[in-house]
Image: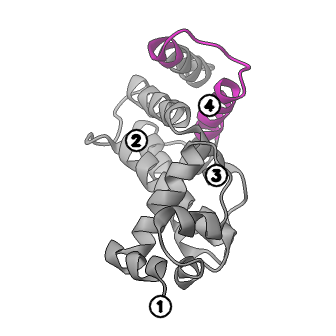
Amino acid sequence: MSTSEKSGYHHGDLRAALLSTAMEMLEAGEPFSLRAVARRAGVSPTAPYRHFKDRDALESALAVEGFRELLADLGGGRGLPASLPDLAEFAVAYVAFALRRPALFRVMFGKPCDDADDERVKAADALHDLLADALDHVFPDADASALASAGWGLAHGLACLYLDGKLQAASGEEVADRVRSAFLAITSVGS
């Protein structure tokens, strides 16, 4: 057994160590492969294959972590929104997450969910369910699923416009104000 293989077993939770290393590489803008992640984590080149079949499986696991983090940001220790301004804060939190974690955000949404990856599908569904529950709470007589898609589309579109440089802002507060204004403008049309 080589030294790198021996050192890899000191991680305790190899999967978590590999995910952490891959996340660091992703956020630093470094291209990564399973071998590169193994090298950076100090484990044998074959060690990642115990947990990830290929690079896509590793990216999918990163996306699951991202969905969980985004859900935590949206929950923020508060209950379901009770008003339109409360709903607008969901959109603000969504865009803020995208701007804070752009590479992870792109991994989360850059590819369709693979139905074979149950964890990624469940994580994406949990996000949609939270949005539908939030909208149903504020608009109990409306089609919560359709509203969730519309609200998600608006927040996601704004996030992408900022990430792609199509919208500019001098500060996080300016971004938040624009997201709130857009969300409230769309949801108040026809009321």
SS at badge 1:
loop
**Spatial separation of the CA atoms under disc 1 and disc 4:** 47 Å
Would residue 164 be seen by someone viewing this image from the given angle?
yes
Q: Amino acid at mark 3?
A: Val
Per the image, the residue denoted by label 4 is 159
Q: Amino acid at mark 4?
A: Ala
N-terminal of the pair, mark 3 or mark 4, is 3
**Foreground of the two, 136 or 79:** 79
N-terminal of the pair, mark 1 or mark 3, is 1
SS at badge 2:
helix
Q: Is residue 152 above or below residue 127?
A: above
Which mark is in front, 3 or 2? 3
Q: Is residue 151 above or below residue 13?
A: above
Residue 156: percent from left, percent from top: 63, 36
Residue drawn at x 27%, y 39% as measured from the top left: 78
**Spatial separation of the CA atoms under disc 3 and disc 4:** 14 Å
Query: Which of the 4 image quarters holds residue 103?
Result: top right
Range of magenta residues: 150-177
Q: Amino acid at mark 2?
A: Leu
SS at badge 3:
helix
Per the image, the residue denoted by label 1 is 1
Which mark is in front, 1 or 2? 1
Residue 61: percent from left, percent from top: 54, 66
Residue 158 forms part of the magenta stretch: yes
Which mark is in front, 1 or 4? 1
Per the image, the residue denoted by label 2 is 74
